[in-house]
Image: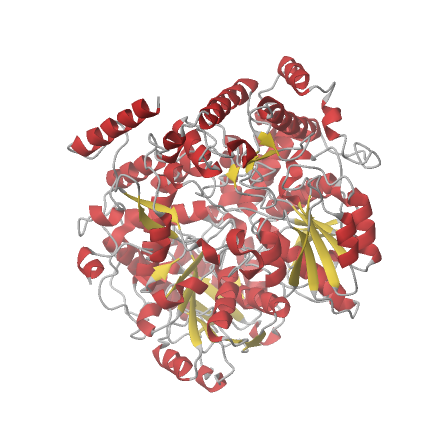
Amino acid sequence: MRYLPLGDADRRAMLATIGVGDVDGLYRDVPRAVFETARLDLPDGLGEIEVERALGRMAAENLSAGAAPCFLGGGAYRHHVPATVDYLIQRGEFLTAYTPYQPEASQGTLQAMFEFQTQVALLAAMDVANASLYDGATATAEAAMMANRLTRRKRAILAGDLHPHYRAATATYARFNGFEVVARPPDPDAADDLEATIDDTTACVVVQNPGAFGQVRDFGALAAACHRAGALLVVATAEIVSLGMVKPPGAMDADIFVGEGQSLGNPLSFGGPYLGLMATRDRFVRQMPGRLVGQATDADGRRGFVLTLTAREQHIRREKATSNICTNSGLCALAFAVHLALLGEAGFARLAEINHARATALAGQLAAIAGVTLVNDTFFNEFTLRLPKPAAHVVAALARRGILGGVPASRLWPERPELADLLLVAATETNGDDDIAAFAGALAEALR
Amino acid sequence: MSEGSQAVSASSRRAAAASATRNRGLEIDELLIFEQDVPGRCGVDLPAPPRFADRLGGVRRAGPIGLPGLAEPQVIRHYTRLSQKNYGIDTGIYPLGSCTMKHNPRLNEKLARLPGFADLHPLQPPETVRGALMLIDTLAHWLKTLTGFPAIAMSPAAGAHGEICGMMCIHAALDARGETRTHVLVPESAHGTNPATAATCGYAVDAIPANTRGRVDIAALKRRLGGDVAAIMLTIPNTCGLFEDEVLAIAAAVHEAGAYCYLDGANFNALMGRLRPADLGFDCMHLNLHKTFSTPHGGGGPGSGPVALAASLARFAPLPWPVHDSGGLWLIERADGAAVDSIGRIKGFHGQFGMFVRALAYLMSLGLDGLRQAAADAVLNANYLLASLQDVLTPSFPGPAMHEALFDDHFLKDTGVTTLDLAKALIDEGLHPMTMYFPLIVHGALLIEPTENESKASLDRFVAAMRTLAQRARAGDSGFFRAAPRLAPRRRFDETEAARRPILRWRPAKEAAE
């Protein structure tokens, strides 16, 4: 009971102040038929040593990505997080604070989020970003609903190389929210003619850059086609580090940017918690979901920061809110902000170049293996290989050799047998030359 | 006294204006990172990449991004100084009603960072992540046992995400019955996410009034029930801090009308280990791991909002979920076979795994005995505050309360002092304010939830401060309150102007002037 400060003497004194004999008297409004009637088969509490031992055993059953050369991407990327990041986000004043509803007592969180919004807007080359959403998939669904509100249309076209989880989450929201989703078939070659799918019922086209198969494209012409039809272009990014080199969505005239921010500051953590990013144009901001921090002036004329434009949000507008989101990914956003503050302009561009260089080296070595072909014309730090046999079998064989050798397309598109021979492979700054050589050697063996 | 404090305030303002640094003692005035930029400076050492042939197909960024350059010590100082302008649970009592700001154990943080958990890719081959699947399955077992439901969807990312997950499952179940129902009922006292969730899920929302006892008006509810009602969303204990003592009759009436009962589990802290919500007649409920099970709020997330489901809703659960077979634990990620009725994915990957590690560490630390004691202590602490303040504040409803105590602003009538003023005065006392102006069904609400982690001495300090402030308000010292806070890192903001002409990002001085 190390977390409970009350002792029995305290409890007795407090019960006397209240005027009840025991604590069960405080539960007297609970129907007797259900109160303390079920026998719950759960163990009693444990000391720190025992809990650490039990969970440590579970952790030891896993092959951690740091213990094997790891080339997995598919929407989650293994980057090096500087020690400073984790130290700073664990400061109790950040870690244990609530959503900053009392600005005079929350200037730390608020200023950090104002800076985060600026960082995200700069990366995407958009006017304004929010203070985060849950993850890339839910941010995509929110973007589609935002486009519906802005265009008063109810039809979203999802590119064939949008991450399948982003596509699936958007389709789930669409079914219940009441809009139509046109999901284009998987498109490893980035050959789909999306412009031909747009008409005057289209609310938005959602594309991903780099795509889920790794292709990098300029969507400027698609943006123009969207705008001619009165539709919006949503550009999603699953690997935010790509924006250190790749032309940003704002420069392609996109209307809404969404993304997954995990790559900066956040561990893989088996898929969560991550952070959803969203940015847009100034003129669309009142339809943007999620929290927004704005600059304000206090009674002494000093600059500070507050939550603002809250008339969009559920706690003010209830069923007329732009979204039901309340808690977002504040601490993950702080980790992102600290990592990006450390990198700065020079470091972020350098990080992107290293990722691209590692991926080009890896692609060269893997594509030289007999029977392996590189599908991509273009890529950033992730690309797709066509193998002479099902990729899932190859990945299992590589795992037995101690290599985490990419994501079989069948894991992300299980309903698409025609993609079974495709393997998604990513490289980051954490993969050295020795990792790459080990992977190439093991893949050649596994295919022999 | 009022004049005296204003004089102090004015002199401290002059002192701040007079300090050469703009600092106020150890409270450091901190510029934005963008205002500390030294071009080329960097806080990370990365080697120059080897020469490579660019494979971007010409889709390159043109020109700089505009990020500032800082070295590592500057970054550490920046965020350390910012942190010092924040108040957290680690600082002191944080009695936000309906937010359950309980202690965040550091053991949980340590365990979530074990490489076998933190350094796991979500798409690793299942054979390499058996321990992670076991952890999800073990936490699911705890949560199912505590709630009494046979199934649980682990992927929702927060409370509101759990709400929409549960409402989607209800919608899917009605679809499967071939029924189109258009309305969801929520009590007037509901948290704003409930109506927003129902609307996002495609439903029209009708509010059900409260009775004079702060509970759902069951007669009004029965009048409204009909073939167009899909579900009712209830919070128990409700946002007045009260147990809905007619819940069994409510659930029976709702079920008789062919609708479902959704439970918002935000306030489960009062009940854990003492009753199972499934026994109250609910069909599903979400849990907030970041409220009830001690994972940190982090200044606004991340949360985690698993949804427990009755047998009638289990087959509609979102993907993915773990299953046992002869080979051990696997993940079902495909909507066919046993999962053919699933609503599909509602987010990427498998849920807020890092939060699962923390929540399971908490559950194992407390155990069933500790959870029962924590619930009882949370209820005891709230009732102690209610009893200690009822003669100076105005309780909205007679007790007993559950985990939180609700007051309205009747005690401030004709004083010129508002709930907001009182909250700001608490900040000057070094205490975080309570939830203000929620629930909406009482005027100028003050909703106080101390949690089980406050000692009696801490509660007594809070009570003493509140009593002093209440007396001061009634003594006619409204100027003192309107000027609060004086001693915080910032004084009150002009929030109207901030919303009228929003400045939502930094821009370079030249751009900002344009």
Instruction: Answer above or below: position of B80 versus A64.
Output: above
- Residue ranking furthest to the top: A9
Q: Position of residue A427 (x, y in %)?
A: 40, 59
User: Which residue is found at the position 15% from the left and 33% from the top?
Assistant: B20
Instruction: Answer above or below: position of A110 versus A51.
Output: below
What scheme was used to colour the molecule? secondary structure
Q: Position of residue B102 (x, y in %)?
A: 55, 33
- Give the image quarter of residue A2: top right
Q: Position of residue A347 (x, y in %)?
A: 26, 53
Relative to the observer, which residue lies in front, B396 or B297? Answer: B396
- Residue ranking furthest to the left: B20
Q: Position of residue B407 (x, y in %)?
A: 58, 34
From this viewpoint, is residue A433 visible? no
User: Which residue is found at the position 20% from the left and 63% from the top?
Assistant: B514
Instruction: Answer above or below: position of B497 versus B295.
Output: below
Q: Is residue A135 left or right of residue A415?
A: left
Relative to the observer, which residue lies in front, B235 or A346? Answer: B235
All told, the count of numbered labels is 0
- Give the image quarter of residue B489: top left
From this viewpoint, is residue B43 visible? yes
- Quarter of the figure with the N terminus of chain B: top left
Q: Is residue B61 left or right of residue A397?
A: left
User: Which residue is found at the position 68% from the left and 31% from the top?
Assistant: B398
Q: Is residue A29 left or right of residue A443?
A: right
